[in-house]
Image (cartoon, grey):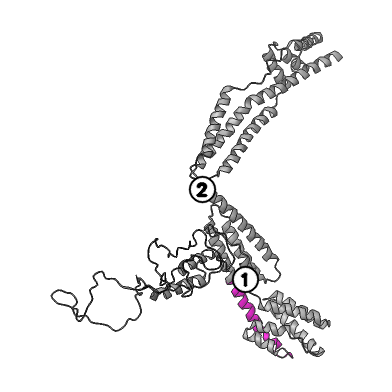
């Protein structure tokens, strides 16, 4: 019995060792084929990227490497995970070594798959199978082999892949712009998400204000989450969101002010509160805040007690429209009732600051992320010639030969180069404005500036017609005007243009990112620039 088990273990160990060496050999043989599949998929991807803006060069290199590794991994996993039973392994090596089914018969008898009547015959067969193992030559059978045809195909496909990646790609610049826009939009989305969470946790907002602000931010987040959104479209969406929040801020501020004005009647009969009540009734929040800060000066304990009761009533009336102010007033009332005049003064100062504050949504409008203008210049702070709020164009406020935009920023590419030329003017032409090189004045060019048709019109004029020619009869001294020109000096119509530009800048019709550019353009057209 011991001899039987020893022989079977000897056969099983040999089969296991051969199976492992066979898997190593197969793994080496199939590695080039896994690489070939990975490189072929990468070549298809690189070819598609030359027709559509799908990947940048760096993305193609990274994806190609990942596909090659994936091909190698798939081959290795397939070779080592593939299961083979001991009988399948025995049959394979019987054929490989020419053992005439000795190993497969021994395994099949041991597993009970092949019934045998004689134990002596079975023992003799096992002994023969175990003895033949010593005569097997494994050296050449398990040598690593790589097909040259596979390597040649890998080399050809790899060469084509390198050419597809490194040759100039017309879609590369387009894709790079898309990637940059996606990064900017991702940052803006993250900022909007944080702003939304801040609004949800803001206890200073009423329920109505909170719902309105969150809905506006949700709409912006949904719009920026769309696939294929360009940076310009994202900028327009952010500007629209900011404008909506600013409009909400004005609306909420008006509602809060109206609530304060209505609540002013609660303070009319309180000693020392006449000035506060009057300022609230007139809507002068600054004066009301100043008066509220000084309200406790000179009050007797009895007056403070009465004042505390009025503050409680005022806080209750404002709770629905201005929770923060109501809380500060309530804190002041409780401090007065407990005799803590210092704490009451601090609470009143907080209330005064909240009275002077902007609308609830104004804070969130200022926190909406600003998009880039796409002009190659980094955004600057207001007053530094950047993307800040554009200032109205005043007559005489245009720019001379410095070529700078409004503010302190030095002009970069596309912001004036110091040539003093107007937009659209070629070098060598005379300037359109009124400034002469020596500081004197030059005549202004006439421009076509017809008036709009409309209105009631003036006095009707009858023009006599020659019955023979059908043409008007000219009387007196007339000047020929064969071209039919109707022009006026340029400086006489500049004011109309300036007014239209200022109206557009103030109305919010022009996106924030473009306001300085528009302002700078029309400033350079000013016929009377500052010297």
Q: Nearer the viewer, residue 88 or 313?
A: 313
Q: Quadrant of residue 243?
A: bottom right
The quadrant of the rendering that contains the N terminus is top right
Query: Is residue 101 something one can see in this rendering?
Result: yes
Mark 2, residue position: 173
Identified at 70% across, 71% down, the residue is 204
Mark 1, residue position: 362
Q: Find the magenta span and give its range.
A: 247-271
Identified at 70% across, 11% down, the residue is 99
Seen in the picture, residue 105 relative to 179 is either above or below; the reply is above
Residue 527 percent location from the top left of the image: 42, 72
Q: Nearer the viewer, residue 434 or 507?
A: 434
Query: Is residue 117 something one can see in this rendering?
Result: no
Seen in the picture, residue 446 relative to 143 is either above or below; the reply is below
Helix, strand or loop for the magenta stretch, by majority: helix
- Nearer the N terminus, badge 1 or badge 2? 2
The stretch drawn in magenta includes residue 257: yes
Q: Secondary structure at mark 1?
A: helix
């Amino acid at each position: 019995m011991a001899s039987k088990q020893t022989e079977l273990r000897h056969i099983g160990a040999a089969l296991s060792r051969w199976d492992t060496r066979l898997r190593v050999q197969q793994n080496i043989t199939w590695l080039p084929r896994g690489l070939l599949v990975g490189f072929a998929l990468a070549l298809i991807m690189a070819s598609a990227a030359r027709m559509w803006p799908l990947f940048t060069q760096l993305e193609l290199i990274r994806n190609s490497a990942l596909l090659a590794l994936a091909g190698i991994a798939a081959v290795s996993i397939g070779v080592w995970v593939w299961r083979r039973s001991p009988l399948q392994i025995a049959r394979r090596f019987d054929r490989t070594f020419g053992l005439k089914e000795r190993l497969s018969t021994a395994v099949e008898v041991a597993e009970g798959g092949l019934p045998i009547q004689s134990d002596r015959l079975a023992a003799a067969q096992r002994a023969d199978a175990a003895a033949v193992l010593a005569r097997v030559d494994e050296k050449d059978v398990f040598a690593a082999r790589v097909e040259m045809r596979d390597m040649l195909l890998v080399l050809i496909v790899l060469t084509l892949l390198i050419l597809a990646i490194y040759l100039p790609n017309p879609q590369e610049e387009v894709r790079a712009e898309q990637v940059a826009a996606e990064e900017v939009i991702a940052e803006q989305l993250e900022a909007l998400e944080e702003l939304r969470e801040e609004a949800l946790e803001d206890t200073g907002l009423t329920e109505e204000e909170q719902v309105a602000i969150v809905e506006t931010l949700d709409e912006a987040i949904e719009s920026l989450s769309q696939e294929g959104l360009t940076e310009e479209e994202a900028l327009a969406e952010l500007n629209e969101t900011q404008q909506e929040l600013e409009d909400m801020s004005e609306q909420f501020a008006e509602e809060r002010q109206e609530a304060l004005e209505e609540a002013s009647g609660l303070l009319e009969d309180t000693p020392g509160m006449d000035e506060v009540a009057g300022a609230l009734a007139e809507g002068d929040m600054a004066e009301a805040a100043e008066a509220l800060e000084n309200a406790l000066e000179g009050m007797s304990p009895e007056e403070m007690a009465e004042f505390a009761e009025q503050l409680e009533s005022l806080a209750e009336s404002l709770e629905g429209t201005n929770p923060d102010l109501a809380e500060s007033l309530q804190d002041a009332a409780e401090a007065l009732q407990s005799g803590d005049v210092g704490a009451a003064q601090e609470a009143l100062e907080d209330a005064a600051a909240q009275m002077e504050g902007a609308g609830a949504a104004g804070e969130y409008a200022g926190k909406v992320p600003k998009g880039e203008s796409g002009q190659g210049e980094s955004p600057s702070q207001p007053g530094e010639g950047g993307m800040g709020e554009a200032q109205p164009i005043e007559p005489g406020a245009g720019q001379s030969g410095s070529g700078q935009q409004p503010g302190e920023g030095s002009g970069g590419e596309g912001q004036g180069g110091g040539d003093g030329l107007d937009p659209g003017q070629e070098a060598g032409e005379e300037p359109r404005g009124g400034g002469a090189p020596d500081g004197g004045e030059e005549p202004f060019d006439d421009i076509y500036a017809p008036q709009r048709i409309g209105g009631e019109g003036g006095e009707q004029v009858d023009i006599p017609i020659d019955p023979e020619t059908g043409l008007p009869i000219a009387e007196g001294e007339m000047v020929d005007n064969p071209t039919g020109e109707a022009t006026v000096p340029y400086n006489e119509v500049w004011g109309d243009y300036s007014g239209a530009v200022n109206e557009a800048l103030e109305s919010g019709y022009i996106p924030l990112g473009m306001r300085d550019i528009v302002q700078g353009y029309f400033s350079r057209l000013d016929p009377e620039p500052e010297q």
